[in-house]
Image: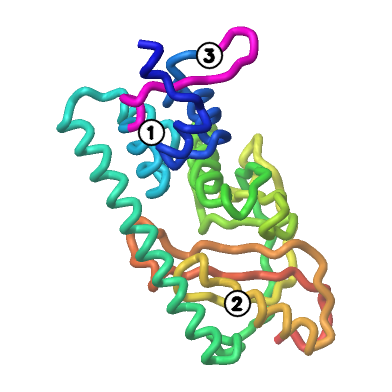
Amino acid sequence: MADDLIPIGRFSRMSRLSIKALRFYDAQGLLAPARVDPASGYRWYRRSQAARAEAIRVLRAVDLPIGEIRDLLGDDDPELIGKRLSAHRERLRARLAEQERMLRFLERLIDRGGNLMSPEVTVKEVPPATVASVTLRVSLVTIGEAVQRGFGTIIGAIGTAGAHPIAAPFLVYHDVLDEGAEGEVELCIPVPAGTPGFREMPGATVASIVHRGPYDEIAPAYHVVTGWIEENGRKPCGPPREIYLNDPQTVAPDELLTEVQFPIEPGGDDR
């Protein structure tokens, strides 16, 4: 049996997995060495483990999460394995469709000089409101799932209080999110005025524009509003808000309506 053992370096070349990756997959319970020297910690593998190593390499190449690889390789049922792979195939197709859509958006953005909308900014008064809210710390990677979960939490709290939503939900960006930074966002759903246990949000004068289309194509709306504020000599005085005017569960992405509001100091001609 000892003749069948292969040092980790040779097994790495055979499996096309780096030594670092082999150590990682061992720690994750995916591919344990056949033998570990108790004194030096050096690792050996068996030739028969090469097939499992190749399966792991291919599954990681198609972005299957570690936990799902562990479940898949632990299954003995070919039908269940097929279902897991089919589910991941659908995720990859959805991701590809999303990336293609974003490339088309980028092409339109470049063709139109960075502006995909006419500058239809309005100034209006937003009245005070009682809101059920929760503040989350998120990144660009986690915001989608966090917002979905957070609004679910708020809906539950509203129901527990015996209240009900009375207006569209919205999001307040207390920080700027970018590729390298997390920030705080506040999820809000308006409820009847004075409902106990919920916070009062003050009114504001806002510069506003409505974006039509997918949420991840909303950046030009921000450009238009901030440009309008600067060009008209107005001063921002609070974090921007996104008000979700229709339900992504019932309308297509191209039909989504999102109002972007920037609080500004009162003044000028706000008619």
Q: Residue at x 72, y 78 (%)?
A: 226
Dot 3: element: strand
Magenta segment boundaries in residue numbering: 37-50
Between 47 and 141, the one lying in front of the other is 47
The location of residue 215, given as percent across then percent down, is: 50, 65
Q: Is residue 28 above or below residue 182?
A: above
Q: From the viewer's perspective, tell me whether residue 154 is left or right of residue 204.
A: left
Between 158 and 138, the one lying in front of the other is 138
Whichever of callouts 3 and 1 sits on the residue coming sooner in the sequence is 3
The location of residue 264, given as percent across then percent down, is: 78, 73
User: In the rendered image, which quarter contains the N terminus?
Assistant: top left
Identify the residue position indicated by label 2 in the image: 221
Between 137 and 90, the one lying in front of the other is 90
Identify the residue position indicated by label 1 in the image: 53
- For disc 2, the neighbor class at 10 Å (few under 14, some 14 to 19, many from 20) is many
Kind of residue sitting beneath label 3: Val
Q: Are marks 3 and 2 in contact (CB under 8 Å)?
A: no
Identify the residue position indicated by label 3 in the image: 36
